[in-house]
Amino acid sequence: MPAAGAGAAALPVVVAHGMGDSCYNSGMKSITEAAGKKLNAYATCVPTAEGWLFDTIDGFLKNMDKSVDFFAAKIRADPKLAGGFNAFGFSQGNNVIRGYIIKYNDPPVKNFMSICGINAGVGAFPQCSPEIPVVGPTVCKGLAEVLGDLAYNKLVQDILFQANYYRDPAKTSDASYLKNSRLAHWNGEGEVNATYVANWAKTDNFIWVEGTLDTVVWPRQGEQWGAMDPKDPWKTVLPMNETDWYTKDTFGLKTADEAGKNHFESFVGEHIRMTDAQLMGWLEKYFA
């Protein structure tokens, strides 16, 4: 397929960092600079708090909605982004971009590339999925059962970013999940939000990148909108087009797919452990 922006001047690029990282770190500064140079475009890493310390801490102690609101304010304060921009994120940074798209998308994200994104949530703690024999499926399942109830407490949802995207595959029909989970609200799992659907449609292309050896996101197929089957929540993974959020089109994923907006890439490796060459190749393919 041709590059998403083929034939046009390169749009500005926004980068969103993952958990425990910061836009103020040398690594993120280097990636942002390399992306701008590769595309001959303005590139900026947009934080979710001011300063290195708070940008790092708030990746844990500021919930998804508040993180998105701060991110949106920074976007709107940058005149170079006023006409729209491309965006890519790492790990939970994609939740911030995704949240910006559904809640705001003005100025619009033209093309969104999610690298090992946690948009579909995680059903287990890192290194503690039923597939990891080191810790053991019984222990990990027990942790999920105990901590899952705490994750869907309103107070916890108001504070912890990671609790917002924790999606216990055995509790997706529970009242506490549907009522309190921010991920459930974003996904339209309890009630469809028409504004979210309309805003999702404003983005031209979505690129979903999966790390095929990822043990941080479980199921890793969630990086491309797969999900555990609620009828067999610990063993069977549903592909994107068999999930409820796709078949019921609860936020516009199916509509985007039928319009040819969804694109899929993968790399053989752990969580966000792609090579520089792979990253630059995706940027050139979809953002140039």
Image (cartoon, rainbow, N blue to C red):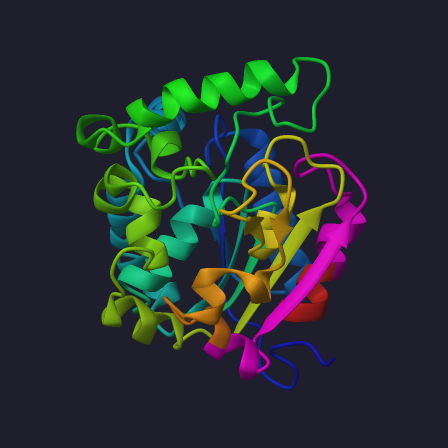
**Total of numbered circles in the picture?**
0
> Would you say residue 51 is visible in this rendering?
yes
Q: Left of 83 or right of it: where is 128?
A: right
Q: Residue furthest left?
A: 155
Residue depicted at x 74% and y 43%: 274
Name the residue nearer the viewer: 98 or 86.
Answer: 98
Q: Verify whether residue 112 appears in magenta.
A: no
Q: Answer with the quarter of the image where residue 155 lies.
A: top left
Q: Vertically, is 267 above or below 246?
A: above
Residue depicted at x 66% and y 39%: 272
Residue depicted at x 56% and y 19%: 140
Residue 207 at what x, y percent from top left?
Answer: 60, 63
Q: Left of 254 or right of it: where is 101?
A: left
Q: Left of 58 or right of it: where is 229?
A: right
Q: Residue furthest front?
A: 231
Residue 23 at what x, y percent from top left?
Answer: 46, 37
Name the residue nearer the viewer: 200 or 47.
Answer: 200
> Would you say residue 204 is visible in this rendering?
no
Q: Vertically, is 187 above or below 2?
A: above
Residue 284 at what x, y percent from top left?
Answer: 71, 66
Residue 74 at what x, y percent from top left?
Answer: 30, 51
- The region drawn magenta spans 255-281
Q: Vertically, is 251 above or below 23?
A: below
Q: Vertically, is 50 above or below 278?
A: above
Q: Quadrant of the C terminus?
A: bottom right
Q: Quadrant of the N terminus?
A: bottom right
Q: Left of 211 or right of it: where is 238?
A: left
Residue depicted at x 62% and y 40%: 30
Q: Answer with the quarter of the image where residue 41 lies.
A: bottom right
Q: Verify whether residue 278 appears in magenta.
A: yes
